[in-house]
Image (cartoon, coloured by chain):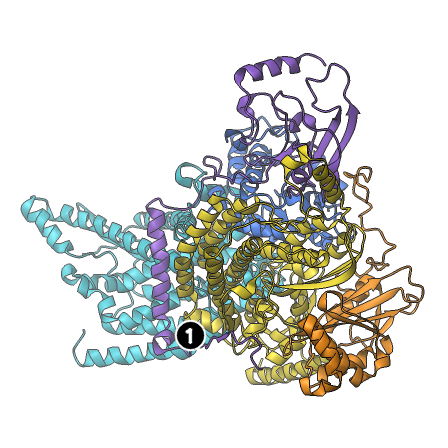
Chain colours: A purple, B cyan, C yellow, D blue, E orange
Amino acid sequence: MQSLSNRAKKLEAKPMTLAERAYLPAIFQGLSITMRHFFRAATKRQVTVRYPDEVRPFSPIFRGLHVLKRDEQGRERCTACGLCAVACPAEAITMVAGERKKGEEGLYREEKYAVSYEINMLRCIFCGLCEEACPKAAVYLQPDKMAPPRFERDEFIYGKDRLVEPVDPQARSIRGIQLTPEQAAALAQRMAQPA
Amino acid sequence: MIELPTLGWQSIVILVVFGVSLLIATYCTYAERVIAAFLQDRVGPDRAGPFGLLQPLADAVKLFTKEEFFPAGANKALFILGPCLAMITALMSSAVIPFGNVIQFGNNVFNLQGIEVNIGMLWVFGIVSLGVYGVMIGGWASNNKFSLLGAIRAGSQNISYELAMGMSLIAVLMISGTLSLREITLQQSAAGEWHFWNIVKQPLGFIIFLVCAFAETNRTPFDLPECETELVGGYHTEYSSMKMGLYLFAEYVNVFVASAVMSVLYFGGFNFPFQYELRDWFVNNQGWALTSAQNLISVLGLLGLFAKIFGFIFFFMWVRWTLPRFRYDQLMRLGWTILIPLAIFNILLTGGLILGGIIK
Amino acid sequence: MAVNDTLEGTRKIVEEAREQQHHTGLIPTLNDFSQELTTLNLGPTHPATHGIFQNILQMDGERIISGVPTIGYIHRAFEKIAERRPFYQITPLTDRMNYCSSPINNMGWHMTVEKLLGVTVPKRAQYMRVIAMELARITDHLICNSILGVDTGAFTGFLYVFQEREKVYEIYEEICGARLTTNMGRVGGMERDFSDVAIKKLRDWLKTFPAVMKEFEQMFNRNRIFMDRVVNVGPITAERALNYGFTGPNLRAAGVDYDVRAMNPYSSYEDFEFEIPVGTKGDTYDRFMVRNEEIWQSLRIINQALENLPEGPFHADAPHYYLPPKQAVYKNMEALIYHFKIIMGEIEAPVGEVYHSVEGGNGELGFYLVSDGGRTPYRLHFRRPCFIYYQAYPEMVVGSSLSDAIVTLSSMNVIAGELDA
Amino acid sequence: MSDIRVPEIKMVDAPDGVEGAGFFATSLESVVGMARANSLWPLPFATSCCGIEFMATMGSHYDISRFGSERPSFSPRQADLLMVMGTIAKKMAPIVKQVYEQMAEPRWVLAMGACACSGGIFDSYSVLQGIDRIIPVDVYVPGCPPRPEQVLDGLMRVQDLARTESIRRRNAPEYQALLASYNIK
Amino acid sequence: MAENTEESAAAQETAAAQDPQAAKNAQLLALLHRQFGADAFTDVEEPYGLLTVTTTRERIHDIMAGLQQDQELQMNFLTTMCGIHYPENEGKELGMIYHVHSLVNNLRLRLKIFFPIADPTVPTLTDLYATANWMEREAYDFYGIIFTGHPNLIRILNVEDMDYHPMRKEYALEDGTREDKTDLFFGR
């Protein structure tokens, strides 16, 4: 057939030379390549990351486990607008919105908040569309945490108890907002009181 | 100089040989994993015990406690017989390998060999060719098409390559004039020099033997009977539990035996360079008795033989993780049209050289 | 069994079978033969069917008389799902089509929507897309070629090049935040600019990869054991290949230099210099070599794109379709409205139909999109190259042995996700 | 990063029969458990994307062989761990079940990825909504596809199960009832 | 191709001034009209530069054969074909859409046919294109379009015992058996 693009590069399959027909040169070449790797590995330069003891660095934009962020004062950012649920191609997010009552201003930033917010981690495909959809920068996919494997199916419905960012500054995601220890302490105290 | 050993000593040696064969086969699985890992820039098992050294034990215990299984429509007796046969024949052939020279305590001379028979080589061959029945029976009894294909492949492959293997050996026999493996070893010990080893006289024969050894042990590039990307598991597809473990062990015992035979036939067995000089040095300079010096040399020779064997085992694994495998018809063509003619040519060449007095 | 009788008989049967197949497209069944044949069920869980599909082979010993492929074992109803999802939610679907080269699928889909919406993407974004797509092509070809090695029994080469794939995953992770199912890019451009780390990783990789690739070639290209396994195995002529709708490396191996990148350049492919490798016989070795050479050509393209990466925005200035930056959403009412509209899928898509194709890992990956102006496609049809060319498989393996069938299968690079959609 | 390594797992109280008679175990049982845990030969039932991530797990960077699991047994008879990776369509479901039935005891099942666990984004007429509808699943690994780290985590959870499991569990009435509820055997 | 289409040269020139693709399409259309008659095609459009014509199922086979054999056009590459369902179009509910491609001239053409859902029969193209085999099986599987003359018209992607054709608009996408999802929050 004629050339369609004028950029064709014909790959000619050369017939085997006598040396190639004798098997051995190619075999020795292959053996020498693997032996090089053997010595490299034997001198402790394997590329393997010994996983539970060592962890490969993740990219700072890796899409890992979700977190519901708090703002600078420790209030939940989520306003239960439902955009993340709409944007989710797996339909993994469900939420129930509620009105913020008087006296809860320290807990929720907006007048509306999510009474319950659940992500079904088994359905979730970690595509990041919810993070992109959130107009309040409330839901984030953390780059340094992954959803752990579990034994039971119902354990994968992550409610607010597991999603909302903890107040402990040590436990925060690296992309999270770092509180000063005083802020954190104040926050923890406030959280401990019944709303 | 060699006395007939007592029956007790013989059984002890045989038990030890069996045990050592099994141990080596067991740790071959570990070695295979680690070597494969290193060849592939990986680490290999390192979580079962220190450096993963308990890995083979874990595998063995797991296999022993796994459910026994008989596929529907399988012939039960044959289904059990298959792996047993494979294992028994693999172990039997190691009985005649001369692992070391004699050890002398006073008037008692102990031979580091299971049984010394003057047809040792024939014994090895006879037993090894029986081994294929284990594979064939197992593959046939499984009542599975993949197993059957594997069994057919194993049968034709082993028979074809045994021919070339045997013929490459005839040249060795022509040089040595004996079938006893011990004799062949001792002949290579003249002055203890490496150039008395048969490899120098028989390079071509060795290469043929090596290729055939790969085929006989069903190792890549000749692992067509199991060949997991084509036949799933080949002849052992339907086997579970320790029956499958027996097949795996049999393969490694075969590798061990093949390595041992190669070391004995071509690489001087338990001989090592300058062994007599070393003995004389101990006798003359250190004032040792001749017997104890000789015993030391025997022990060193034993270790040397094992070093050679391990070298070959490593080579088997190195090749396995490097080369692609043949296709069935290409394998047959290689056996019948290249190796057998080469082996015949090797016989003629050796004959000519012997007649010409160049080698003896 | 007399060897000659069987061989002769087999050859005759094979000839007849081939004839019959050419004429009717029908695969002869067991009843058509008087010989005693075995039926071998290859798949769906056979190790060599890396994805999931079944071939029921009629065998005479180890020789294949006929094969009947059955597919659909991971049919996921992409086209039906796509009719219920807004445009931007279809990107995760395309990820999972040819999962070996997700970014190509992503970009192809974005370009289709951009064509429909009439959005022009700035040059920088186009070059960024080219880099991502060529990276994907390399990984796709790497996995295909190294799996061919695995299927011929050499596992180690696979692990060597898979390390390179890992590095590409790292680059993906820096670009978009995921390793395999990338969900990369947005309608109108990329979702973020290349970070410095991404560029640095890419440059490092471009330096180290050629050596590994050379090593891989040394292990396979001229190794007789490998060549014996693949030369003249599973050949197909250019005419038959075209008739079967082959595209991509498999067609080029048969000698037709059809490449969407050169014929209908998209995303600035006309700016780059590259050659289109073609084979001669269309056999497994040609397919292997074409893919090998394409890896080198892709490297060339990446190098050019990286050197000439233009400055400028990484997305189109199209507030109706491209999400505003988060900061603007907090402050700017207009941005907030757009944000809501885009996420709810209420963008003003024109009524119309558009076909756009890109050169995927396996050939022409086409998107036929019919829009009725609603928030979802009215009909979205994927032209999946695997689906189209896999039907030639029985014709390619008839008369060869089981081992040949396996290597032919892996050299065709049939990706189950793309096959079954 | 320390929190990645120890996921907050409800430690093994889940599987039936673990607390049955003789669990507080003889040393034989613990030895067997250790052996089984360190020699889980997987049957990679890879249908789609997750299969590629499994290859990455087998690859040099992650090296599943460290856990003693690098020998993939494509024959179900020899496998200990069925790793279902990727979408299971309704057309495929009977085959998964058949493979599970062919496996010899003890056998574990690891569902890898959103599709195998729950159907994931493919909530469509042709996709099985989670393989636990046809076979009992021991460990779920979320993600689409999960990172190899998560797969290794999942493997370690299976090892936890294997280590603490009584040898007699497989004969326990609870286990038989579990299988019966799936209509297996 | 140029010398054969001199009569439409005037039309071409105006078109070519705007868009080279439009000129090519005009040439192609003229050629089609001459070969198969102007009455063979209705609804000629050029959405996004791809010439789209509608024809009837009676003529589709001839046209495809003619396109394939035409030495000048060499439209011998069937890119893809797919079904489509418009429940509102009375008497023309179902459709088939063919994309053909001339690799030599780098020209694409989209052909459409529509027919009633009560009588969904279309002549097969498997005698022209080997690749049409599975595409037609897919269209049958999805839409229930019967291709007369197809050698092996059975379902390809779905299970054999499925009793409906899922891509038709009236059938639901979702699997009815799922338990962990509700439609409450997703306005779909």
Pick the residue in front: A87 or B36. A87
Pick the residue in front: B120 or C292. C292
- Residue reaching furthest bottom? E3
Q: Position of residue C135 (x, y in %)?
A: 52, 56
Pick the residue in front: D120 or A100. A100
Within the image, what quadrant is residue C8 found in? bottom right
Chain containing the residue with disc 1: B
The answer to whether residue E28 shows anywhere in this view is: no
Q: Which residue is mark 1?
A: B335
Q: How many marks?
A: 1
Within the image, what quadrant is residue E55 found in? bottom right
Q: Position of residue E48 (x, y in %)?
A: 72, 65
Please determine whether, in this image, residue A178 is positioned above or below residue C407.
above
Pick the residue in front: D141 or B70. D141
Q: Residues within 10 Å of mark 1 (few under 14, many from 20)?
A: many
Q: Position of residue A83 (x, y in %)?
A: 74, 37
The answer to whether residue B341 shows anywhere in this view is: yes
Position of residue E71 in the picture relative to residue C50 (left or right): right
Please determine whether, in this image, residue B213 is positioned above or below residue E132.
above
Position of residue B352 in the picture relative to residue D78 (left or right): left
- Residue for point 20% across, 78% down: B354
Please determine whether, in this image, residue C36 is positioned above or below residue D140.
below
Q: Amino acid at mark 1?
A: Gly
Position of residue B280 in the picture relative to residue E91 (left or right): left
- Residue for point 65% across, 35% down: A151
- Residue for point 56% across, 52% down: D73
Q: Position of residue D121 (x, y in %)?
A: 71, 46
Classify mark 1: helix, strand or loop: helix
